[in-house]
Amino acid sequence: MVNVLKRMRHLQPLFAIRHGEGAAILPPPPLPQLTRLSLQYDRQQWNKSTRPARIFHKEHLPRLKYHNPGLPITVEQGPGRLQLTFESADQEALNELESTSLETSSDGEYRATWSPIEAKSQAGSEAPTPSPASSAGSAFTRSVELRLGPHQPGSLWNWFQTATKCEPFPENPEETAQMDRLKEFFAQAEIDRQRVKAGMDAIRKQKEELKKARDAAARMANEE
């Protein structure tokens, strides 16, 4: 049988990606559909200006992709910006996206630029699978580009939630209870590890002191 601790450690990453900030479900039609997400930032720099984008990339996007596997996501080296492309058969719904997202940027922290609404080109489309909007008839697209700066990490995700109207993944009480048990298990495991280490260190120290005493006794005997 596989060691229980090893099996539980394998479960931990699964729980981490299924729950937490970023674990969200994109809305179904008739709301506008997010058809592409592109994130660019200076991945070689580790400073305040790139921290929000880095956290969004490392923590939020894996959870978002897990719950929305059909969403194309690209992360590239480049100037700090987040680009979202929406598609809908309802032009008014695409219009409302801009006014809704502005509610979170009234302080001037964000600089979001929305493109005009355009009819989707059916012939030259490179979408991997037809979206629900395009299958219903005429489809329209609209994109937004958000310039990234030294924002708070949480505020970037909050802006994304407002712009896309995504909903947090519903908590499963059974999984939540299991995650709590895992946390307790690993917390106790760390306490036990420290206790064992302290015991081993004490034994090692005693052996070193005993060796020193023997060496001292041997030197005294030789001097006589």
Image (spheres, rainbow, N blue to C red):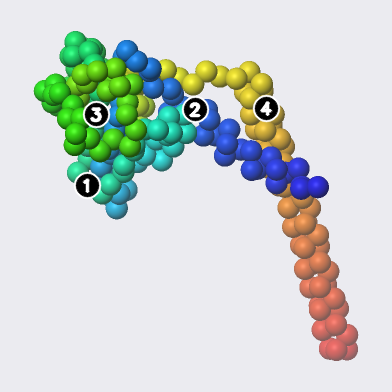
Indicate which label's residue lies in the foreground, 2 or 3. 3
| Label 3 Cα crowd, 10 Å radius (few <14 / some 14-19 / many 20+) | some
Indicate which label's residue lies in the foreground, 3 or 4. 3
Residue to which mark 4 is pinned: 178
Residue 95 lies, in percent from the top left, at 18, 14
Amino acid type shown at disc 4:
Gln
Q: CA distance from mark 4 to mark 1?
A: 40 Å
Q: Please name whichever residue, 155 or 202, is drawn nearer the observer in this view of the structure.
A: 155
Q: CA distance from mark 1 to mark 2?
A: 27 Å
Residue 72 lies, in percent from the top left, at 34, 36
Residue to which mark 2 is pinned: 20
What residue is rendered at 47% in x and 33% in y?
Answer: 66
Q: Please name whichever residue, 195 or 77, is drawn nearer the observer in this view of the structure.
A: 77
Amino acid type shown at disc 1:
Gly
The label shown at residue 85 is: 3
Is label 1 in a helix, a strand or a loop?
loop
Indicate which label's residue lies in the foreground, 3 or 1. 3
Q: Taking the image as drawn, is residue 71 in sight?
A: yes
The label shown at residue 78 is: 1
- Whether residue 194 sits left or right of residue 127 in the image: it is right
Disc 3 or 4, which lies upstream in sequence?
3
Split into 4 quadrants, where in the image is the C terminus?
bottom right
| Label 4 Cα crowd, 10 Å radius (few <14 / some 14-19 / many 20+) | some
Amino acid type shown at disc 3:
Thr
Q: Are marks 2 and 4 in contact (CB under 8 Å)?
A: no
Disc 3 or 1, which lies upstream in sequence?
1
Q: Is residue 41 above or below residue 65?
A: below
What residue is rendered at 38% in x and 18% in y?
Answer: 27
Disc 1 or 2, which lies upstream in sequence?
2
Residue 130 lies, in percent from the top left, at 32, 29
Is label 4 in a helix, a strand or a loop?
helix
Q: CA distance from mark 3 to mark 1?
A: 18 Å
